[in-house]
Amino acid sequence: MDVVMNVLIVILAAAFLWSRLAPTKGVNNITTDQLREMMKTKQAGTQFIDVRTPGEYKGNHIKGFKNLPLQQLGSKTGELSKDKDVVVICQSGMRSSQASKLLKKAGFKNITNVKGGMSAW
């Protein structure tokens, strides 16, 4: 019986980790080099969102990115247009991945996550 319980716990833990770390279907992932190229051509209407804390954003940010911390993003999606592309960045790529999932669930269609975040910038 103990073996069955241990196996169940391992399976549940693996499923939980997979749900947190798996890439979100329908979200594009780009490198910081690809972001640099995108910023050069700066497509009209693209919404650039930095989901780090205000302190992190103040310390260093990319010009053109708006600060909407991840903790507030759910209540501020109304400030963004669902019809325009959204590019999301954070410090390492983890919070922006979570933000991408949140935006996808909120009905946004064209979402791009920057892998590696500001650490890779």
Image (cartoon, helix red, strand yellow):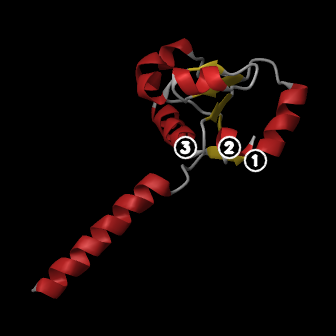
| Tag 3–tag 1 contact (CB < 8 Å) | no
Q: Secondary structure at mark 1?
A: loop
Dot 2 alpha-carbon crowd within 10 angstroms: few under 14, some 14 to 19, many 20 or more: few
How far apart are the alpha carbons under marks 3 and 2?
15 Å
- Residue pointed to by mark 1: 31
Q: Is residue 114 visible?
A: no
The type of residue carrying mark 3 is Ser
Measured as percent of width and height from the top left, residue 35 is found at: 79, 37
Q: Quadrant of the N terminus?
A: bottom left
Dot 1 alpha-carbon crowd within 10 angstroms: few under 14, some 14 to 19, many 20 or more: some
Near-viewer residue (25 or 31): 31
Q: Is residue 3 left or right of residue 14?
A: left
How far apart are the alpha carbons under marks 3 and 1?
13 Å
The type of residue carrying mark 2 is Ser
Measured as percent of width and height from the top left, residue 77 is found at: 49, 20
Of the two numbered discs 3 and 1 on the same chain, state the one appearing first in sequence: 1
Q: Is residue 54 visible?
A: yes
Of the two numbered discs 2 and 1 on the same chain, state the one appearing first in sequence: 1
Q: Quadrant of the C terminus?
A: top right
How far apart are the alpha carbons under marks 2 and 1?
11 Å
Question: Which residue is at 16% across, 78% downward?
Answer: 5
| Tag 2–tag 1 contact (CB < 8 Å) | no
Q: What number of labels is visible?
A: 3
The type of residue carrying mark 1 is Thr
Residue 19 occupies which quadrant of the picture? Answer: bottom left
- Residue pointed to by mark 2: 119
Q: Secondary structure at mark 3?
A: helix
Question: Which residue is at 31% across, 66% downward?
Answer: 13
Question: Which residue is at 54% across, 22% downward?
Answer: 55
- Residue pointed to by mark 3: 97
Of the two numbered discs 3 and 2 on the same chain, state the one appearing first in sequence: 3
